Amino acid sequence: MNYLKAAFLMPGNLFALAVSGAVVAYYGQAWPALIAVAAEALYLAAVSAAPPFRRAVRARQSGALDGPQEQVAALLEELAPSQRENYFALRDLRDKILGNYRKLPGGRVLAASSQHHVDALLTSFLRLLSTLNNYRKYLNASDKKGVERELGELKAEADQEQNPRLREVKLRRVDILGRRLQRYLQAEESRELISHQLASIEDLLRLTHEQSIAIRDPESVNRQLESLHAETASTEQSVREMERFMEFDEVLAPALTHGPRVR
């Protein structure tokens, strides 16, 4: 897979390159071109190596999303050993739940219909774990205090700046730093939400298992399936929202579009 080529051809990157070319033409000097080339190299290295981006490239080149088993295998590769063990423990719970359902009248049909819901919830659990890891990397690579300090200093400078052009540039940087800080705060909040969502899935599966031990009628199974279906739908919505936040073209393209910082 040519991930570098795919990263290069992303619309956000092509737009950033066009803007960088205009800046180079405007100044007519070598230093803007050198900075643009360095920024492009960093962008390509970061994006092409990102697991979510690689999954998206594989999906586009195959003409369809990966199948369930391939998707699970790809997600498991990204997890830490302790996280994989956690997932395998929940998968064992799934097998026990389905085994208890099979003991009921018409149990084979109940187990087959139940497995679809449980497997969908487990896949969402894996995607949430992967997204949580991405948030942790993002927060670890960010310097919140540094951004806050620089933002405060720049605001003070902009308020006292007499040169209109310099003041405009500084205010633009204030806006960019403000958005960076806001993203950091959103990431902190989202990371906590993901942690609680993961714990909620584990609690629900354990509760479903405990109830399945003493269950005696198919109607009770249907009620359990409704709970699993509702949890899956809620989790899937959360996963999509969290993954959108971490999309690289939305994170990196605005910074490149505004051009490099020169001091």
Image (cartoon, rainbow, N blue to C red):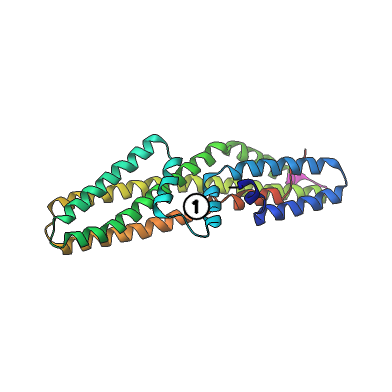
Q: Is residue 91 magenta?
A: no
Quarter of the image where one finds residue 90: top left
Part of the protein shown in magenta: 158-163
Q: Is residue 203 above or below residue 153?
A: below
Inspect the magenta stretch and tell me whether residue 160 lies in it. Answer: yes
Q: Is residue 236 left or right of residue 248?
A: left
On screen, residue 10 above or below 150: below
Rendered location of residue 242, percent (x, y): 48, 52
Residue 206 visible from this viewpoint? no
From the viewer's perspective, tell me whether residue 217 is left or right of residue 148.
left
Please give left or right for residue 206 compared with residue 195 in the image: left
In the rendered structure, the answer to whether residue 8 lies left or right of residue 183 reads right
Residue 101 in view: yes
**Callout 1 crowding tier (Cα within 10 Å): few <14, some 14–19, many ≥20:** some
Q: Secondary structure at mark 1?
A: helix
Image coordinates of residue 20 in percent, x first then y, are 77, 50
Residue type, label 1:
Glu
The residue that mark 1 highlights is 243
